[in-house]
Amino acid sequence: MSDTLPQGWITATIDALNEYKSRLIDPQKYAEETFELYSVPIFPTGQPEIVQGQVVGSSKQLVELNDILVCKINPRINRVWRVSSGNPKLRKIASSEGDVSIVVETWRSWLWLRITIWFSDMISGCLSIASGGANI
């Protein structure tokens, strides 16, 4: 990557843009409440799971509309979610397996897109190397 940026541009880490402060909840304390659960097992469906608090087995992170969730488990698999509108009446919770990035509003769409593309590029490169399609 070049160190030269266009005039007026800056570099920053995701951490510098992140405004998230962890907020944990034990859904079992709200046994009758219905939640939208963003978790690794349900990720392939593209939709959060709708669950009662009584069936959730551990504490979760409270997340909000447009939060960006990046899975820490098995990073070779692209699992980046942006919390969608879903049901506005339900509280949204996420597995602790995910990093939550709540960035300055201006950067949310860009960051979600960039992370998704980066994961795809990284996986393509790894598959190419594994199949002998790249020289190291």
Image: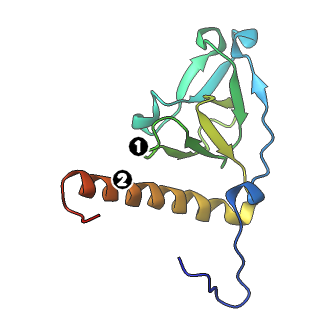
> Measured from the top left, where is residue 49 in percent x and y?
52, 27
Q: Is residue 97 above or below residue 57?
A: below
Quadrant for residue 96, please give it: top right
Residue visible at 58% across and 28% down in the picture:
37
Task: Read off the residue under disc 1.
Answer: 77
Residue 33 % position (x, y) = 69, 16
Q: Amino acid at mark 1?
A: Ile
Helix, strand or loop at label 1? It is: loop
Q: Residue furthest front?
A: 136
Residue name at image x 57 percent, y 19 percent: 51
* Residue 53, percent from left and from top: 66, 14
Q: Are marks 2 and 1 in contact (CB under 8 Å)?
A: yes
* Residue for badge 2: 123
Image-quadrant location for residue 52: top right
Seen from the viewer's position, the closer of residues 24 and 93 is 24
How far apart, in angstroms, are the residues tagged by discs 2 and 1? Answer: 7 Å
